[in-house]
Structures are given as C-alpha cells and as structure tokens.
Amino acid sequence: MVTPGVNERPRRLRWVAVAQALLWCAIGLGAFLLLAESVQNSAEFERLRPWILLVDLCGVIVLSVLLARKLWRLVRDYRAHVPGSRLTARTVGIFGGLVIAPLLIVYLSSLEFINRGIDSWFKVEVKQGLNDALRLSRAALDLRMREYSARTVALAAALTDAAPAGVQSRLDAERRASQATEIALFGPHEHILAASLENPLEGLPSQLPADLVRQVVQHRPYVSLEPLTGGQYLIRTAAALGDAAAGHDGRFVVAVYPVPAQLAALSEAVQSSYHQYGDLAALREPLKYSFRLTLTLVLLLAMLAAIYGAIFSAQRLVRPVQDLIEGTRAVGKGDFGTRLPLPSRDEMGFLVHSFNDMTKRLRRARAEATHSQQAVERERERLAIILARLSTGVLAIDRSMVVRTANEAAGAILGTDLSGATGRSLPELAGGNERLGQFVAALAVRFAAGREEWREQLDLDGAAGRRTLMCACTPLPGEDSDMGFVIVFDDITTLLQAQRDAAWGEVARRLAHEIKNPLTPIQLSAERLRRRLLSGMNERDAEILERGTRTIVQQVQTMQQMVNAFSEYARAPEMQISRFSLNQLITEVADLYRSQAPHTRIRLDLDEHLEGIEADRGRVRQILNNLVTNALEALDGVGTPTLEIATRLEAGADAEYAAVTVCDNGPGFPRELLGKVFDPYVTSKPKGTGLGLAIVKKIIEEHGGRIDADNRPEGGARVRMVLPVKDSTRSATGGARERLDQLRRERA
Amino acid sequence: MLRGVPTRDGLTRGSLLTTLCVMALASWGPAYGDALDGVLEVRSAYVNLDKGVFLLHARIDYPISPAIRSALRDGLTLTVDLEARVDRQRRFWFNLNIVELTLRRELSYHAVSDRYVVRDTKSGDQESFATLDEALGYLGKVDAWPILVEPQLDGGNYTISVRAGVRRGHLPASLRAILFWTDDWARVSEWYSWLLPA
C-alpha cells in the first residue's frame, strides 16, 4: 500500500539514480576525452593509460554489479511469486531478445568485415611493388657505388707507389675529378697521412666506421651507402694500398661521394614508403585482435547495458501493475484505505487514478454501511432490552415454526427456557413440555386453517394447573414471503383469578349481609313458637313442633356457620405483624396434629437458615392448620399416610423469601380441579365448604406472598407457598396493610 | 663518480595502477605478448659531477630477438627510451620528484642502404650502422648525459632512478586508441635506483 506521503522517498531515490547516471556518463565521457587526447602524445598516453583503464574497469564493474543485483532480485522475486515478477521476467526476456539478437548480428558482421578489411590493406601486390621499388633504388645506387669503389681502388693502386710529396696533389686532383666531398689517405692505426676536402674548413675527414677498417685490413675494398639527416645520402668507399699478395702495409684511402639530389630524393621516398608499410604491416594481427577484442567488449557492454535497461524499463512498466495487484489484494482483504501513487499521466496513470477513485468510493460506502449497521445494531439492542424487560411474551417464528426471536417472558409464561431456542423449531422445543406442546398445537391448528392474524385466549393445562394466555398473532411485514409471524401473549391467569376472587368476595359479602340478617329472626321465631306452643299441645303435636323447630334452628345454625365462613372469607381483619420463628410454629402445629392423628407420619424438613419471619403469627398458624387439615383429610384411607412439611430460605432478586411446602402421599388433586383449587366452593370433599384453600390463598396474598398447588410426580398433592421474610419487602409494594387495602379495592 | 648500490624502488602509484589494470585485463584475454622477448635491463649506471653538472653514464641491454630483427627489416621503427628521475626522499610522504628526463631515440632499418639507423628524436642527429648489434651496442651505451645541476639539490637524500623502455614507434594516432588493449610492442625495464651520496 502506498500513501501519498510515502512518495517522497521514491522521488528522492529517482533523483539519486539520475545523479548517479549523470556522474557515470561524465566519467565515461572524461575517459573518452582523455583517451582521445593522450593518443596524440606517446608520453601522455603512457601516463594516462592506467587511469583510463581504471575508469573503464570501474565502469564495467559497477555496471556488472548493478546488473547482477537487478538479476538477483528478479530471480528472487520470481521464485517467491512476487506479484508482477513473472510479467517483469517476460518483459525482460522480450526486450533483451529484441536488443541482443540485432547486436549479435551486427557483431558477427563487423567481425567478418574487420577481418576482410584489414587483410585487404596488406595485399601481396603492394608488398611486392614496394620491394620492386626498393630493388630499383638499390640497383641505381649500386651502380654508382661500384663506380666509386672502382675509382677508389684505382686511386689506391696509383698511390701505392706514389712519392709522398705528390700524394696531396694526386688526392686533390682525384677529388675534383670525381666530385668527391673528401678523399683521405690513412696510415697504420688510422693516422691521416693526407686529405683533400671539398670544404677545408671542416678540418678533418669524417669519422671512420668500424666495419670499414675491419674490411680494409683484410685488403678488401669497402663501399657503403650511408643515409644522412634530411634525406641525403653519401657513398663511402675505401681501398687498401699495395698488393694483397704482398700484405697490408697499413695504408688505405677513403673517399666520400655525394649522391645526386634527385636520386637521393627518389630513394628516400621509397624508403619512407617502405617504413610506413612496415609499420602498418606489423600492426596487421594486433589490429585484427584489437578490433575483435574492442568489438567484443563493446558487445558485452552493450548487452549488459541492454539487459540492465530492459530490467529497468520492465520494472518501471510493471511497477504500476504491481501496485495495482497489491492494491487489489488489499481491497480484497477489506483494506479500502489503499491509495496508489500516480506513475504518469498516460493510460496506466488513468487506470491507477480510477483504482484510487474506486477505493475512495468503496471506503465511503463502507463507512456509510458501518454507520447504518451500527444504528441498526443500536436499535436492535434497544429492542432486545425492551423485549427482555417486557412481562408480555414475544415470540417470532417463521412459517415452519422455527424460532427467530423469543424474549425471557415468553419462556417464563410457557414454562421453558427459550434463551437458546433461536433457530430451533417450536415442536422440537415442546418435547416434554406439556404447556408448550399445547401452545404449539394451538398455533399449528390456526396456521393450518390459514389464519395468520388473530387474537384469542388460550387455556393451557399442565401439572401446575391451567394457565390462561391472551395471545395475538400477526404476520411479519417484508418482501420475503417466509418472514413468519410474531406472537405476543400475556399470562392472564392471575388476572382472571383476581377477577374471580373479587367476584367471590362480593358474593361472600352479600351472602353475609343478605342471608345472615334474616337467620337470627328465623331462629328466634322458631324458638319462640316452640316455647309458646309446646306447652299447650298434645304430645303428638308437641313432638311434631319440637322436631320442626329443632330442624329449623339446626338448619339456621348450619346456614349461620356457612355465612360465617363466607364472612370470614370476605372480611379483611387488621394484621398483627410480629417477628417469630416459622420453623418453631410449624413444629408446634405438627406436634398438635401428631397427637390428633397418631397413625399419620408427619415429617419435617426445616431449613435452619430460616431464623425468623415478620408476619401475622395467628393467620400463618391458620394457614398451616388449613393445609395440614386438608392433607390429613386427603390421607384418610391411605395405607401409610405421610405428611411432609419443608421450609427453605430462598433468595429472590430483591429480597429473601420463606418457602413452605406441604406434601402428602394421598390421591392428589383431581386433574380437572388443578388451577381452581383456590377458588371458593371448589372442593373434592363431600363435607367441605370449599373455602379452606380460598382463605389460605387470601391470607397469603395479604402477606404479599404467593401459593401454588400441583401433584407430585410420585403421587400425592403438593402445596407450595412463599412468604416474604421481612415486612419491609412487602412495604416496597405498600406493606401488608396497603396490600390488604389494594386487595380490597381489587375485589371491590 | 657518484654511484651507489642499486635498489628496487617500491611500487609507485602509476605502477600500482598499471599492475592492477594489467591484472584485470589479463583476466579478459591475452593482452600482452612476447614480441619484445629478451633481456631488457639497465646493467649499470652512475653519475659524476662535472663543473656543477651531474652526468649520467649507463649501460643497457636491449633485447635482440628474431622477431625484432625481422620486424625491423620489414620496416618497423622502434622507439628506445632511457628515463631518468631524481627524487628527494621524504620520511612520511611520497618522495618529491625533482627531475624527470627521457632520452628518446629511434631505431630503424634503412632498406635502401641496408643499414640500421639510430636517430635522436630531440636533436634529429642520426647514426647508421652496418649491423643491428652495432646499433644496439650504440644504444646501450650512454655517456655523459646531463640530468641535474648542483643548485637543484638543497640538502637531504636523493634517489636517482634509471629505466629503459622499448616500444613501437611511429604508431598512427588513429590506431593508438584501437591498439589500446593489445600493444605488445612496449616494454620497460625495472627501475635501476641508487642513493645519491650527500
């Protein structure tokens, strides 16, 4: 990923690379100029040659190192599958091939051209022509040399017997006659005996060559052609005096003759050409070798430079592609902050610009999506909190009754834990749960009937009694046809029960008020009738009256008991709240009933942590009496009657509660009465008033508690009541007194 | 006669560079050949002070190989150099060069006269010899070559070095660059050095 801030470094590196390239170009140009300058001067060439070599060598080494570095990186990236490396390698191959192939062709052609060209410079005909010219010049000069040599020999013969006085004149005459520049007569040990010079001011004859003396000593005539400065020649001849057979007496004559200027010039021209050709001919093989070597070096340098340039160009070309690949990968991984540097203003630059624009739009879109998602998530959390706090059950299911959402209240109402029910079908969850099974069956019946929106009351029977739900179903809106339904339901069992309690309380109050009042006059009237009339009647009538009034009084008393019971149910006396030990009270009640029902086993399971409870002790005792009495009556006829009373200290969310469970092993509550056992006039006993458990429930509620009744799985009835340990807990809802007033108002 | 024990001077900068470059080039191919094969050395040298002028006398052996003979007779010109330098010795730095002179002469075969010619390139004077041995003998004997005057010395120790060289002469400038790598007609002898007595 390349950000705009990171572009500074590549820019700096680019300037450094350009500066290095310029530096090396300057050094190379300098070396070339040095070479061009030095070849004009041999001494300068020798002095600068090592430096030129060093500069060239450094250039080659640097280029090789750079190329090796580039190649190594290319191979490394290729093996590591770096994005763009294969494209770079392919481009380098193509570029290199396009450059190297013509280079090789030019190289081979140049080699052939050099070999043929240099060979053509040194044709046999040229060499032969020069040799012929040389021989011609030598022939022309040899003629004169022989002529001069003969004159010198003749002069030597003439001087052999000449008188010493006439030698000088003879030499002068001969010099003038032969146009020699000097003629000298030497004696033993090269002593000058006489000399005739063309320029007497020179004083002495010229120095003798060593080979001249050696040859003359052997009595052989000497002749030589000596080149002079300025293209002049001279012919030096010498001859010994005397007869060879008689031996050498040490005297010899030396003559020096000039060569005509025209002949000398022609000979010098031939000599000059011979020299030039010789110098060049000596260069033939070195020249070919040098050309081949130079060409090879140039080829190698060009190939190195071409490959380096190919790699460099390929990397520059592929760099934006690599950036695009890396950027695409980054975008693929979700990094939309990728921004690529603009390589140029060409098509690749347009592509990179489009990529940057795309990532910018993606980044903006993702930010908006994230923002929306966060808003939705916040709404979802808010809704979840609301649903969790609702006492109303909310259940969202699809058309195949798979749970999508369920709040805690739904689980509590349906008697199961629905916290992990999302994604599971309701029928699967209903296995083993009777109440939920009935709920699912009720839903299935309505969905099967094509009813998607309804509001009805559902009665669900279970081991804990009947629960009544007010249920409303609505299809969820949405484009998807399988959006499903949302089912909202309330447990209105308590509400209905309260309504029934209120109705029964009113009935009891009216009964107590309307029926109780006439009973007393009826009883009094009946007693008065018996008292007045009984004494004046015969025995038979008296008996009839006696029986009739007794029946009336008994029935009135029975009705009064019933009215009193109703009155007891209806009235709400002041509670005397005090702190006492519930365990001790239970123990007392149990001891009382152990004496009354010795055959019944009364077992206590009391929680020692339950130390005390704040309640109306007398009314709690009444509750216990009613429950134990009911249980003992239910145990009548049971083989081994057993009654169990247990207490537990339970911690609620905001307070502690005392739970009292009374169980027996009797027949239990009839199934049809479960849920209604606390209603007035609901009893399974032939003699019961049906108000016992109703009064118990009423007292429990006055204490802010609750009571449930169900059957134990192993058989027998079970009544469980829960009372707040502290009255202040009840105060949270107004205390016992206010609770009582509230109940009164509800019943009213 | 001012003569000392000849010593081998250390590698100078030029010779070091040359050695390095030659070693590098040698790895590229046969750059130098053996055209000037044979002994090339300064056999002896000394200076004497004559009227305030130091005169150098040297005896040099120049190579005489069949290749040289053949090449000379084919028209090649050889340049024969005698280099002399005087350096003032310094303890902690490179020696200071006082004098650097070259006696340059050319040896060629005069085909028309069938003689070997030795020419002083500076004065233009030339001598001819009937044989190559005579010409080389002439070249190998240098007497009374003035290289230094007394006022140039201001105390301290001085080293006199003499070196002989042979190379192809008359190389055209246009070809000199091309023959940059393969000029095997060039050799120099070891430096013949001695200390100038104080």
Image: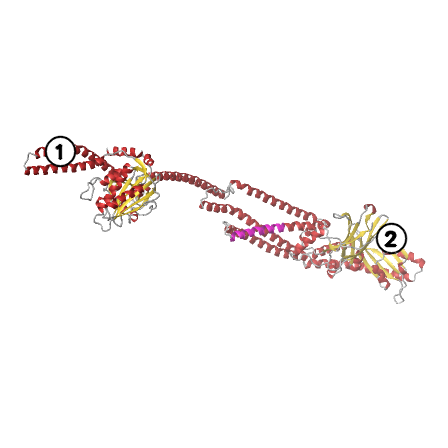
Instruction: Depth check: give the residue in front, A556 or B94.
Output: A556
Instruction: Depth check: give the residue in front, A430 or A516.
Output: A516
Instruction: Depth check: give the residue in front, A360 or B92.
Output: B92
- Above or below, A362 against A168 in this view is above
Whether residue A509 is visible to the viewer of this picture, yes or no, is yes
Q: Which residues are magenta?
A: A59-79
Could you tell me which residue is drawn at 63 percent across and 49 percent down?
A: A59
Residue farthest to the bottom?
Answer: A245
Instruction: Depth check: give the residue in front, A425 or A666.
Output: A666
Q: Amino acid at mark 2?
A: Glu
Tell me the chain of label 1. A
Foreground mark, 1 or 2? 1
Q: Residues within 10 Å of mark 1 (few under 14, many from 20)?
A: some
Can you give x and y, in whole percent of width and height, for residue A509 in the image?
20, 34
Tell me the chain of label 2. A
Quick one: quadrant of the C terminus of chain A? top left
Q: Amino acid at mark 1?
A: Ile
Q: Quadrant of residue A720?
A: top left
Can you give x and y, in whole percent of width and height, for residue B89 in the image?
77, 49
Can you give x and y, in whole percent of width and height, for residue B80 in the image?
76, 54
Q: Main secondary structure of the magenta part?
A: helix
Can you give x and y, in whole percent of width and height, for residue A220 in the image?
84, 63
Horizontally, is A206 left or right of A110 in the view? right
Q: Residues within 10 Å of mark 2 (few under 14, many from 20)?
A: some
Residue A198 is labelled as: 2
Query: Could you say whether the residue bearing mark 2 is in a helix, strand or loop?
Result: loop
Residue A38 sits inside the magenta stretch: no
Disc 1: which residue? A522
Query: Could you say whether the residue bearing mark 1 is in a helix, strand or loop?
Result: helix
Q: Which label's residue is closer to the chain start, 1 or 2?
A: 2
Whether residue B78 is visible to the viewer of this picture, yes or no, is no
